Amino acid sequence: MQVIKNTSINFYGARKVAYALSLVLILAGIASLVVKGLNFGIDFKGGTEVVLRFDHDIEAADVRSVLREAGLGGSVKGYGNDRSILVQSDFEGDLNQLKTLISSAIDDRFPDNAHELMRIDSVGPSIASDLKWAAFKAIAGALAAILLYVAIRFEFRFAAASVVAIFHDVLIVLGLFSILGGVFDIMPLTVDLSIIAAFLTIAGYSINDTVVVYDRIRENIKGGKPADYERLFNESINQTLARTVITSGTTLLVVIVLFIFAGPAIRGFSFAIMVGVLVGTYSSVFIAAPLVLDWNRKFGRAIHLRGS
Protein backbone atom coordinates (compact mmCIF):
# COMPACT_ATOMS: atom_id res chain seq x y z
CA MET A 1 0.00 0.00 0.00
CA GLN A 2 1.32 3.42 -0.94
CA VAL A 3 0.97 6.17 1.63
CA ILE A 4 1.64 8.82 -1.00
CA LYS A 5 0.64 8.18 -4.61
CA ASN A 6 -0.33 9.98 -7.79
CA THR A 7 1.01 13.34 -6.66
CA SER A 8 1.48 16.11 -9.21
CA ILE A 9 3.35 18.76 -7.23
CA ASN A 10 5.16 21.38 -9.28
CA PHE A 11 8.50 21.18 -7.45
CA TYR A 12 10.34 23.05 -10.15
CA GLY A 13 7.79 25.86 -10.09
CA ALA A 14 8.35 26.24 -6.33
CA ARG A 15 12.12 26.35 -6.64
CA LYS A 16 12.44 30.13 -6.27
CA VAL A 17 10.60 30.05 -2.95
CA ALA A 18 12.84 27.16 -1.86
CA TYR A 19 15.97 29.00 -2.99
CA ALA A 20 14.89 32.10 -1.04
CA LEU A 21 14.15 30.09 2.11
CA SER A 22 17.49 28.31 1.88
CA LEU A 23 19.30 31.61 1.33
CA VAL A 24 17.70 33.13 4.44
CA LEU A 25 18.64 30.10 6.58
CA ILE A 26 22.20 30.00 5.27
CA LEU A 27 22.78 33.76 5.66
CA ALA A 28 21.38 33.66 9.22
CA GLY A 29 23.73 30.81 10.01
CA ILE A 30 26.74 32.54 8.47
CA ALA A 31 25.95 35.75 10.37
CA SER A 32 25.83 33.78 13.62
CA LEU A 33 29.07 32.00 12.76
CA VAL A 34 30.79 35.35 12.18
CA VAL A 35 29.35 37.11 15.25
CA LYS A 36 29.01 34.26 17.75
CA GLY A 37 31.12 31.46 16.34
CA LEU A 38 30.91 27.81 17.37
CA ASN A 39 31.25 26.10 20.71
CA PHE A 40 34.20 23.80 19.99
CA GLY A 41 34.88 20.80 22.18
CA ILE A 42 38.30 19.90 23.49
CA ASP A 43 38.84 17.72 20.41
CA PHE A 44 39.43 20.88 18.39
CA LYS A 45 40.59 23.49 20.89
CA GLY A 46 42.51 21.39 23.41
CA GLY A 47 42.18 21.49 27.17
CA THR A 48 40.50 19.38 29.80
CA GLU A 49 36.85 18.44 30.22
CA VAL A 50 35.32 17.12 33.45
CA VAL A 51 31.76 15.92 34.06
CA LEU A 52 30.51 15.95 37.67
CA ARG A 53 27.30 14.42 39.00
CA PHE A 54 25.83 15.50 42.34
CA ASP A 55 23.35 13.76 44.61
CA HIS A 56 21.11 16.84 44.68
CA ASP A 57 20.31 19.72 42.35
CA ILE A 58 23.05 22.32 42.08
CA GLU A 59 23.54 25.61 40.27
CA ALA A 60 26.34 25.87 37.72
CA ALA A 61 27.03 29.42 38.93
CA ASP A 62 27.77 28.14 42.45
CA VAL A 63 30.22 25.53 41.16
CA ARG A 64 31.83 28.12 38.88
CA SER A 65 32.40 30.45 41.84
CA VAL A 66 33.99 27.68 43.91
CA LEU A 67 36.35 26.57 41.14
CA ARG A 68 37.42 30.13 40.38
CA GLU A 69 38.28 30.66 44.04
CA ALA A 70 40.38 27.49 43.80
CA GLY A 71 42.26 28.98 40.83
CA LEU A 72 40.59 26.93 38.11
CA GLY A 73 39.20 29.05 35.28
CA GLY A 74 37.26 28.03 32.19
CA SER A 75 33.65 27.24 31.40
CA VAL A 76 31.24 25.71 33.93
CA LYS A 77 27.67 24.91 32.88
CA GLY A 78 24.83 22.47 33.38
CA TYR A 79 25.05 19.19 31.53
CA GLY A 80 21.80 17.50 30.63
CA ASN A 81 20.04 17.83 34.01
CA ASP A 82 20.08 19.84 37.25
CA ARG A 83 22.51 17.46 38.96
CA SER A 84 25.26 17.29 36.35
CA ILE A 85 27.93 19.89 35.64
CA LEU A 86 30.37 20.19 32.73
CA VAL A 87 33.71 21.86 33.45
CA GLN A 88 35.92 22.89 30.51
CA SER A 89 39.34 24.27 31.34
CA ASP A 90 42.70 25.08 29.72
CA PHE A 91 44.37 23.10 32.52
CA GLU A 92 47.49 21.26 31.37
CA GLY A 93 49.16 18.98 33.84
CA ASP A 94 48.61 15.96 36.05
CA LEU A 95 44.96 14.91 35.83
CA ASN A 96 45.13 13.37 39.30
CA GLN A 97 46.13 16.78 40.61
CA LEU A 98 43.12 18.30 38.83
CA LYS A 99 40.78 15.69 40.33
CA THR A 100 42.08 16.45 43.82
CA LEU A 101 41.76 20.20 43.28
CA ILE A 102 38.15 19.98 42.09
CA SER A 103 37.02 17.43 44.68
CA SER A 104 38.60 19.29 47.60
CA ALA A 105 37.11 22.64 46.59
CA ILE A 106 33.62 21.20 46.07
CA ASP A 107 33.64 19.06 49.22
CA ASP A 108 34.61 22.07 51.33
CA ARG A 109 31.80 24.23 49.93
CA PHE A 110 29.07 21.59 49.50
CA PRO A 111 29.60 19.02 52.28
CA ASP A 112 25.93 17.94 52.17
CA ASN A 113 25.82 17.39 48.42
CA ALA A 114 28.12 14.49 47.53
CA HIS A 115 29.49 14.39 44.01
CA GLU A 116 31.02 11.86 41.66
CA LEU A 117 33.50 12.51 38.87
CA MET A 118 31.86 10.81 35.88
CA ARG A 119 34.38 11.60 33.17
CA ILE A 120 37.64 13.43 32.61
CA ASP A 121 39.21 13.95 29.17
CA SER A 122 42.27 15.91 28.14
CA VAL A 123 43.57 16.85 24.69
CA GLY A 124 46.82 18.72 24.08
CA PRO A 125 47.01 21.70 21.66
CA SER A 126 49.10 19.82 19.08
CA ILE A 127 46.68 16.87 19.05
CA ALA A 128 43.72 19.26 18.72
CA SER A 129 45.39 20.85 15.69
CA ASP A 130 45.96 17.42 14.14
CA LEU A 131 42.32 16.49 14.73
CA LYS A 132 41.14 19.69 13.02
CA TRP A 133 43.21 18.87 9.95
CA ALA A 134 42.01 15.26 9.95
CA ALA A 135 38.38 16.42 10.15
CA PHE A 136 38.91 18.82 7.23
CA LYS A 137 40.50 16.07 5.12
CA ALA A 138 37.65 13.68 5.92
CA ILE A 139 34.97 16.14 4.80
CA ALA A 140 36.90 17.31 1.72
CA GLY A 141 37.64 13.72 0.72
CA ALA A 142 33.99 12.71 1.09
CA LEU A 143 32.80 15.62 -1.07
CA ALA A 144 35.41 14.89 -3.75
CA ALA A 145 34.41 11.21 -3.82
CA ILE A 146 30.72 12.12 -4.11
CA LEU A 147 31.46 14.58 -6.93
CA LEU A 148 33.43 11.94 -8.83
CA TYR A 149 30.86 9.19 -8.26
CA VAL A 150 27.87 11.23 -9.44
CA ALA A 151 29.84 12.67 -12.39
CA ILE A 152 30.70 9.14 -13.56
CA ARG A 153 27.23 7.73 -12.97
CA PHE A 154 25.32 10.68 -14.46
CA GLU A 155 27.18 13.78 -15.69
CA PHE A 156 29.00 16.77 -14.23
CA ARG A 157 25.91 19.01 -13.94
CA PHE A 158 24.24 16.45 -11.72
CA ALA A 159 27.41 16.00 -9.67
CA ALA A 160 27.88 19.73 -9.10
CA ALA A 161 24.23 20.19 -8.09
CA SER A 162 24.44 17.29 -5.62
CA VAL A 163 27.55 18.76 -3.96
CA VAL A 164 25.85 22.18 -3.75
CA ALA A 165 22.91 20.46 -2.02
CA ILE A 166 25.27 18.80 0.47
CA PHE A 167 26.98 22.13 1.22
CA HIS A 168 23.48 23.57 1.68
CA ASP A 169 22.57 20.87 4.21
CA VAL A 170 25.79 21.08 6.21
CA LEU A 171 25.77 24.91 6.31
CA ILE A 172 22.22 24.98 7.68
CA VAL A 173 23.06 22.43 10.39
CA LEU A 174 26.30 24.25 11.23
CA GLY A 175 24.42 27.55 11.41
CA LEU A 176 21.90 26.07 13.85
CA PHE A 177 24.77 24.83 16.02
CA SER A 178 26.05 28.39 16.17
CA ILE A 179 22.63 29.98 16.77
CA LEU A 180 21.51 27.49 19.45
CA GLY A 181 24.92 26.67 20.93
CA GLY A 182 25.02 27.39 24.66
CA VAL A 183 21.32 28.29 24.78
CA PHE A 184 20.03 25.05 26.35
CA ASP A 185 21.98 23.16 29.01
CA ILE A 186 20.01 20.03 28.18
CA MET A 187 21.37 20.15 24.62
CA PRO A 188 25.06 21.16 24.62
CA LEU A 189 25.74 21.76 20.93
CA THR A 190 29.49 21.32 21.06
CA VAL A 191 31.37 20.75 17.81
CA ASP A 192 33.64 17.75 18.31
CA LEU A 193 34.59 14.62 16.39
CA SER A 194 31.11 13.12 16.82
CA ILE A 195 29.65 16.13 14.99
CA ILE A 196 32.12 15.65 12.13
CA ALA A 197 30.82 12.07 11.95
CA ALA A 198 27.29 13.50 11.88
CA PHE A 199 28.19 15.81 8.97
CA LEU A 200 29.60 12.87 7.00
CA THR A 201 26.42 10.90 7.76
CA ILE A 202 24.30 13.83 6.58
CA ALA A 203 26.31 14.00 3.35
CA GLY A 204 25.78 10.28 2.76
CA TYR A 205 22.07 10.46 3.52
CA SER A 206 21.58 13.53 1.33
CA ILE A 207 23.37 12.04 -1.67
CA ASN A 208 21.41 8.79 -1.29
CA ASP A 209 18.09 10.66 -1.57
CA THR A 210 19.42 12.75 -4.44
CA VAL A 211 20.70 9.76 -6.43
CA VAL A 212 17.27 8.09 -6.15
CA VAL A 213 15.70 11.16 -7.77
CA TYR A 214 18.46 11.34 -10.39
CA ASP A 215 17.96 7.66 -11.28
CA ARG A 216 14.27 8.23 -11.92
CA ILE A 217 15.10 11.31 -14.03
CA ARG A 218 17.46 9.17 -16.10
CA GLU A 219 14.73 6.58 -16.69
CA ASN A 220 12.12 9.16 -17.65
CA ILE A 221 14.29 11.39 -19.79
CA LYS A 222 15.13 8.72 -22.39
CA GLY A 223 14.24 10.20 -25.76
CA GLY A 224 12.81 13.32 -24.14
CA LYS A 225 13.21 16.71 -25.75
CA PRO A 226 14.57 19.75 -23.87
CA ALA A 227 11.10 21.30 -24.04
CA ASP A 228 9.79 18.35 -21.97
CA TYR A 229 12.48 18.51 -19.27
CA GLU A 230 10.47 20.49 -16.72
CA ARG A 231 7.55 18.05 -16.92
CA LEU A 232 9.88 15.04 -16.79
CA PHE A 233 11.81 16.40 -13.81
CA ASN A 234 8.59 17.10 -11.90
CA GLU A 235 7.21 13.65 -12.73
CA SER A 236 10.44 12.02 -11.56
CA ILE A 237 10.42 13.83 -8.22
CA ASN A 238 6.73 13.03 -7.67
CA GLN A 239 7.29 9.36 -8.51
CA THR A 240 10.05 9.06 -5.89
CA LEU A 241 8.27 11.20 -3.30
CA ALA A 242 6.66 8.30 -1.44
CA ARG A 243 9.97 6.47 -1.10
CA THR A 244 11.72 9.67 0.02
CA VAL A 245 9.12 10.58 2.64
CA ILE A 246 8.78 7.06 4.08
CA THR A 247 12.55 6.49 4.27
CA SER A 248 13.15 9.89 5.85
CA GLY A 249 10.20 9.50 8.21
CA THR A 250 11.31 6.13 9.59
CA THR A 251 14.89 7.37 9.99
CA LEU A 252 13.64 10.50 11.71
CA LEU A 253 11.58 8.50 14.21
CA VAL A 254 14.65 6.55 15.30
CA VAL A 255 16.76 9.70 15.61
CA ILE A 256 14.05 11.49 17.62
CA VAL A 257 13.98 8.59 20.10
CA LEU A 258 17.78 8.79 20.33
CA PHE A 259 17.59 12.55 20.86
CA ILE A 260 15.01 12.27 23.65
CA PHE A 261 16.36 9.30 25.58
CA ALA A 262 20.11 9.46 24.94
CA GLY A 263 22.37 11.28 27.34
CA PRO A 264 23.80 14.75 26.70
CA ALA A 265 27.05 13.25 25.41
CA ILE A 266 25.43 12.28 22.09
CA ARG A 267 22.46 14.66 22.08
CA GLY A 268 24.35 17.07 19.83
CA PHE A 269 25.07 14.22 17.40
CA SER A 270 21.43 13.13 17.31
CA PHE A 271 20.28 16.76 16.88
CA ALA A 272 22.62 17.17 13.90
CA ILE A 273 21.35 13.97 12.28
CA MET A 274 17.71 14.91 12.98
CA VAL A 275 18.05 18.32 11.31
CA GLY A 276 20.24 16.85 8.57
CA VAL A 277 17.62 14.25 7.62
CA LEU A 278 14.94 16.94 7.34
CA VAL A 279 17.11 19.37 5.39
CA GLY A 280 18.60 16.61 3.22
CA THR A 281 15.14 15.40 2.21
CA TYR A 282 14.10 18.96 1.40
CA SER A 283 17.24 19.66 -0.66
CA SER A 284 16.98 16.46 -2.69
CA VAL A 285 13.63 17.54 -4.16
CA PHE A 286 13.75 21.34 -4.01
CA ILE A 287 17.46 22.10 -4.56
CA ALA A 288 19.46 19.34 -6.28
CA ALA A 289 17.14 18.45 -9.18
CA PRO A 290 15.90 22.02 -9.91
CA LEU A 291 19.51 23.27 -9.98
CA VAL A 292 20.31 20.78 -12.76
CA LEU A 293 17.38 22.01 -14.84
CA ASP A 294 18.26 25.67 -14.21
CA TRP A 295 21.82 24.95 -15.35
CA ASN A 296 20.51 23.21 -18.47
CA ARG A 297 18.22 26.13 -19.34
CA LYS A 298 21.01 28.64 -18.87
CA PHE A 299 23.43 26.87 -21.20
CA GLY A 300 20.82 25.26 -23.45
CA ARG A 301 22.48 21.88 -23.89
CA ALA A 302 20.55 18.61 -24.06
CA ILE A 303 21.00 16.19 -21.17
CA HIS A 304 22.72 12.93 -22.12
CA LEU A 305 22.94 10.61 -19.12
CA ARG A 306 24.92 7.39 -18.98
CA GLY A 307 22.54 4.45 -19.23
CA SER A 308 19.68 6.54 -20.63
Image (spheres, grey):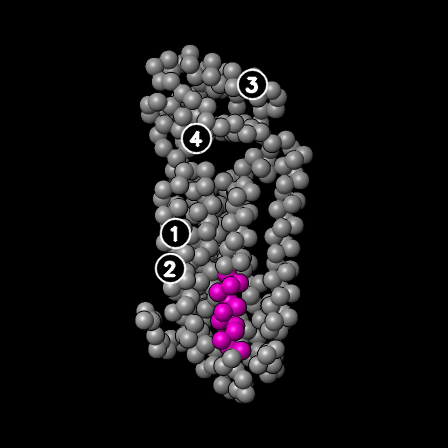
Q: Nearer the viewer, mark 2 or mark 4?
A: 2
Give the structural element (helix, strand or loop) at label 4: strand
Kindly indicate whether the residue at mark 3 contacts the one at mark 2 (C-beta within 8 angstroms): no
Kindly indicate whether the residue at mark 1 contacts the one at mark 3 (C-beta within 8 angstroms): no
Q: Residues within 10 Å of mark 1 (few under 14, many from 20)?
A: few
Q: How crowded is mark 3: few (under 14 residues within 10 Å), some or many (20 or more)?
A: few
Give the structural element (helix, strand or loop) at label 3: helix
Picture disc at residue 254: 1
**Numbered disc total:** 4
In-image side of 49 versus 93 (left or right): left
The residue that label 4 is drawn on is 77
Disc with the residue nearer the chain's start (3 vs 1): 3
* Residue drawn at x 32%, y 71% as measured from the top left: 1
Disc with the residue nearer the chain's start (2 vs 1): 2
Disc with the residue nearer the chain's start (3 vs 4): 4
| SS majority, magenta | helix
From this viewpoint, is residue 130 visible?
yes
Observer-nearest residue: 301 or 27? 301
Q: What stretch is highlighted in magenta?
A: 206-218
Picture disc at residue 249: 2
Residue 216, magenta (yes or no): yes
CA gap, disc 3 and disc 4: 22 Å
Residue 295, magenta (yes or no): no
* Residue drawn at x 47%, y 45% as measured from the top left: 269
Q: Quadrant of residue 223?
A: bottom right
From this viewpoint, is residue 181 visible?
no
Check the picture and name the quadrant holding the C terminus: bottom right
Picture disc at residue 96: 3
Picture disc at residue 124: none
Disc with the residue nearer the chain's start (2 vs 4): 4
Give the structural element (helix, strand or loop) at label 2: helix
